[in-house]
Image (cartoon, helix red, strand yellow):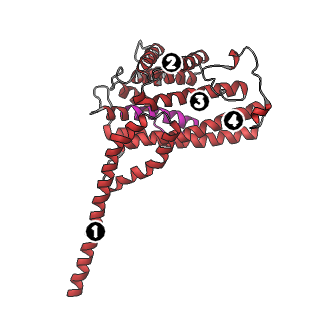
Amino acid sequence: MFPKLLRFAAIGGFATALSACGMIYKTTGDVLVRYGQDEMVPYLMHSDDVDMSCAMGESLTPLLLSFEAVGSKPDKLGALVYTTAALCSENLALEEELRYQRALRRGDVDEAKDARTQQKRYAEIAARRQLESYNRTIKVFGEATEDSCPKLKNDFDELVWMVGSISGMQALLNDSTANNRVGVPRDVPAKVQRGAACLDNYKWWGVPNGTRAVIWNILPMLAPEGADGWAELEKSVRLGFQHGVRLPSALYAMTAYSIDDPERMRKGIREFVANDKNINEEYALLDALATHIIQSISDRLWTDRTGQRTPYGELGTFWDDQTQEEDINIDDLLF
């Protein structure tokens, strides 16, 4: 009888210890989530280092999300870190796209095929991460409808809603590059359009209406009757410049690139570069992300026409702007 009691006591003590560990882990997770919302995200938003944000997203996401298993709720932060993690794979996909363009110019079919394959692989990873960001956003807040919006309690909630919604659109674009391997739902644009209307357009620098206008221009069947997508984008761009966050300007150029409108592409890039003063330091990261979008579009255009990406320090210029060839010292290429 006594040995049995000892066994029961041991089992009970072990179970109690496990329960205590679970409580400690949950407390740790809750503290981490709160710290992330209150301190980490504002700190990152003040940074203009996109590469560091990308690395942070890839390195911290598994740690942060592992606390779901013990009852913590990191979905809001998860939407943000999955978005920043996707930047890494998007960067890699861009490099392969540029390699593909250079190979085509040389007539190197094998190199072009290899680059395109690798581009699709990275685009698939980006799409999966961005879709996860979007799904976690919807999991937390629910979907917007024609008659109601989700309950967004504070600026952080609104930021997550905005970033998660844009990630849904990016996921769709990257999935298209990856031959729809991820299977991003085709109704995401319609849902994002409804959701963008739930944010104050002036408060968020024209991004909400700019996002809706992007969808109207790329998918005209979703535009309300009488809506002028480009006119709305123009308004959003001016509002963004006024507030020192140039994300609407990047959306303008991205839309022009998506529908192959060279004139608006150049206009968007030039205006973006010309309005690089008085950047809102509180959201420096979003402006840096906008710069990244503009730089990637410019690099594609330059590589397609010249075989090289945008020359260093020359963002906002184009190959046919040049009046004379730049003198190059071969020694500068060796050291």
Spatial separation of the CA atoms under disc 3 and disc 1: 53 Å
20 over 321 or under it: above or below: below
Spatial separation of the CA atoms under disc 2 and disc 3: 18 Å
Q: Amino acid at mark 1?
A: Ala
Spatial separation of the CA atoms under disc 2 and disc 1: 59 Å
Q: Is residue 331 left or right of residue 240?
A: right
Spatial separation of the CA atoms under disc 4 and disc 2: 32 Å
The image quarter in which residue 4 lies: bottom left
Tell which circle, 2 or 3, labels the residue nearer the N-terminal end.
Answer: 2
Which residue is identified by label 1? 17
Residue at image location 40% in from the left, 26% down from the top: 193
Give the magenta part as a residue range.
161-185
Which residue is identified by label 3? 296
Decide whether residue 331 is among the magenta residues. Answer: no
Tell which circle, 3 or 4, labels the residue nearer the N-terminal end.
Answer: 4
Tell which circle, 2 or 1, labels the residue nearer the N-terminal end.
Answer: 1
Q: Amino acid at mark 2?
A: Asn
Image marks 3 and 4: residues in contact by CB distance under 8 Å: no
Q: Amino acid at mark 4?
A: Tyr
Q: Residues within 10 Å of mark 3 (few under 14, many from 20)?
A: some
Kindly state the secondary structure of the residue where label 2 is placed: loop
Image marks 4 and 2: residues in contact by CB distance under 8 Å: no
Kindly state the secondary structure of the residue where label 4 is placed: helix
Spatial separation of the CA atoms under disc 3 and disc 4: 14 Å
Which residue is identified by label 4? 100
Q: Residues within 10 Å of mark 2 (few under 14, many from 20)?
A: some
| Numbered tag placed on residue 275 in the rendering | 2
